[in-house]
Amino acid sequence: MNRERMKTGIIGAGGWGTALAMVLATNQHHTTLWTRSEAVANEINQSHSNSVFLPGVTIPSSIRATTNPRDLDDTDLLVIAVPTQYIRSILHKYQFNFSGKIVASGAKGIERHTLLRVSEILKDAVGITDKFAVLTGPSHAEEVARLMPTTVVAASTQPDIARAVQKAFTTSAFRVYSSVDVIGAELGGALKNVIAIAAGIIDGVKMGDNTKAALITRGLAEMTRFGTALGAEANTFSGLSGLGDLFVTCSSRHSRNRRVGEQIGAGKSLAEILAETQTVAEGVSTSESAFELSRKHGVEMPIVEQVYRILFDGKSPRKAIHDLMIRRAKPEQW
């Protein structure tokens, strides 16, 4: 659909970074995929596959993988697709050149200790204040890479940057909407991972659809309340980066965060789960950051608090659910 070719670079060759590279390649952009791993780069370049992060997917031969950050110097668009907790260290270590480029973030999380959103990390770490957009929404890499119809949102405080990212990524299978609410888009993408861990816990303890529906509904209310307190627009949480992403992450078999919760509910410890997986569940770190932020800003977030208590204080999932159910009766509020 998009005939204006750009030079694009992706920082991070996990499942999401690879899937986004495939979307850009569909629009015939010159796409370079950066990874720290020589093995991953060699497999992408020689076998056109990424068996660790996207098994069974054939990667277009037009996508080039590299371990050299200088290969991304002359790009027009740089996409950050590494887990939130590693963004700062990777940018400092590899010294990517962001000068004059549009920068899009595909990461979803809140940095531990600093409590910063991704746009704030980029400003703090490398001075990016303009030409920035967040690309977020209900979009599992496994489905994007297989051209299953997907819709996301590109949010930027500068409408022309949101439209540029929208144009670069929009294909017949990957529809991109635009927004100016960066705060809402980032917080929706981050907080839904925490609620998804709770959804997995419900599955793990074998509770039913009523319980899951209550969690998703009240989780969305919690996300909206928190987001608007931090300057987001309430309507954003009814859109793709809020309700859309929340629904898919709480229900999908592809969701790493839901899977972590399911294993917690079935009796495994967090340490055991993290030791057994190669992929990152952003909701684990974000639950800690969101809990601290909620206390800092005086926003009531009972679901986030109980997920935090389960993960980091060893609270029983059934006791956490019980404590949520016996809270003081009140009107339904958003």
Image (tube, rainbow, N blue to C red):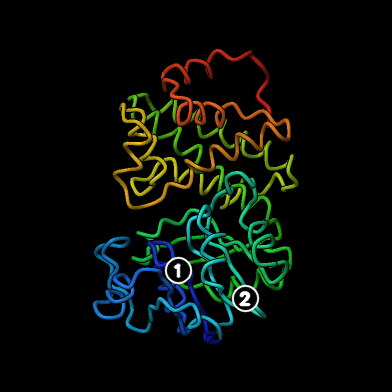
Whether residue 238 is situated above or below residue 326 in the rendered picture? below
Whether residue 52 is situated above or below residue 109 in the rendered picture? below
Between residue 320 and residue 121, name the one nearer to us. Answer: 121
Image mark for residue 310: none
Between residue 134 and residue 113, name the one nearer to us. Answer: 113
Looking at the image, tell me whether mark 1 or mark 2 is earlier in sequence order.
1
Between residue 25 and residue 114, name the one nearer to us. Answer: 114
Looking at numbered disc 2 in the image, what kind of residue is underneath it?
Answer: Phe
Looking at numbered disc 1 in the image, what kind of residue is underneath it?
Answer: Leu
Residue 313 placement, left or right of 226: left
Q: Secondary structure at mark 2?
A: loop
For disc 2, the marked residue is 98
Residue 267 horizontal/vertical position (percent): 31, 26
- Say which quarter of the image contains residue 21: bottom left
Q: Secondary structure at mark 1?
A: helix
For disc 1, the marked residue is 20
Q: Separation of disc 1 and disc 2 at Cα?
A: 19 Å
Residue 226 horizontal/vertical position (percent): 67, 38
